[in-house]
Every structure is written in C-alpha cells, then in structure tokens.
Image (spheres, rainbow, N blue to C red):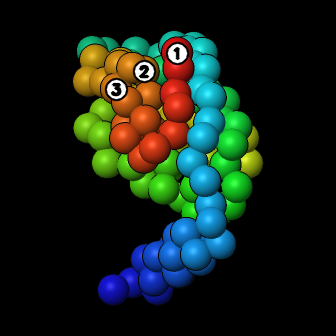
Amino acid sequence: MKMKSVAALLILVLGLIAGCQSASEHTVASAPEADVKGQAQFERATIKVSGTYCVACMVGIRRSLERIDGVQKVDARETDVVVEYDSRKVAPSTMVKAVEELGFKATL
C-alpha cells in the first residue's frame, strides 16, 4: 500500500472515530472549457458543500468523484469541490449521486 493511501485511510478512520457526520448541500455551476478538434470537452462544476466536519469527509468525496469515468480532476477544499469533467461522458447529476451515496445531501 502506498504511503499516501495509508495516510488517507488513517485520516478517514480518525474522522469516523471522531464522530464525523455526513450532511451537506451542493450546488453545481458549469462553465465549458475548450473543445479541441473533437477531443473531450471539459467543463468545470463547483459543488458547494456544507456539513463536512473533517478532512476525511472531503477526502471521501474527492476519491468517490475521481472514480467516475469522465472526471478529469477534483479539487476538494473546505466547503468547495471543483470538478473538471468530460461532459460527453458524465453529467453533474451523476457526480451529485456519487456524493449522496456517501451519505451527504446533494442537490443541483
């Protein structure tokens, strides 16, 4: 297991032990990037998050989103999650559903 994976797992476990609760609200705003010669068209969605109580919450959200085909990059900080994604492969509603599956409330 890689050192980063061990550290992330430790953060997640410590967050769960500390009683981290999952409750958040999300909004998604998209702005198209460039479509170069038929290649992937990346858009950026900003998901506003409330109710995260620790770093482990954001790590879990980031990892869940990164597993979705079409998601290029995820930047999760405090109350904002910025996702760059290929709009031909994934919709914002799919990303919201992934967050909901973690136990957070998510809305478009």
Are the residues at dot 3 and dot 1 in contact (C-beta closer than 8 Å)?
no
N-terminal of the two: label 3 or label 1? Answer: 3
Q: Nearer the viewer, residue 48 or 33?
A: 48
Where 57 sits versus 17, above or below? above
Please state if 51 lies on the left or on the right of 75 as rendered: right
27 or 2: nearer the eye?
Answer: 27
Alpha-carbon neighbours of circle 2 within 10 Å: few (<14), some, or many (≥20)?
A: many
The N terminus sits in image quarter: bottom left
Mark 2 and mark 3 in contact? Answer it, CB < 8 Å: yes
Sequence order check, earlier mark of 1 and 2: 2
Residue 79: x and y in percent read 72, 41
Residue identified by numbered label 3: 94
Which residue is depicted at the point 30% across and 40% down? 68
Query: Is there CB contact under 8 Å for labels 1 and 2?
Result: yes
Q: Residue at x 48, y 56 (%)?
A: 60
Q: Is residue 32 above or below residue 19?
A: above
Q: Secondary structure at mark 3?
A: helix
**Farthest residue toward the right?**
78
Which residue bears the numbered disc 2?
92
In the rendered image, is residue 36 in sight? no
Tell me which amino acid carries mark 1: Leu
Q: How many C-alpha atoms fall within 10 Å of the one at disc 1: few (<14), some, or many (≥20)?
A: few
The amino acid on which the numbered mark 2 sits, given as a three-letter code, is Pro
Question: Residue 36: x, y in percent?
Answer: 38, 18
Circle 1 residue: 108
Q: Secondary structure at mark 2?
A: helix
Q: Which residue occupies 49% across, 48% down?
A: 61
Res. 43 in view: yes
Q: At label 3, which amino acid type do we have?
A: Thr
Whole-Å distance between the Cαs marked 3 and 1? 11 Å
User: Quarter of the image holding residue 46?
Assistant: top right
Vertically, is 13 above or below 106? below
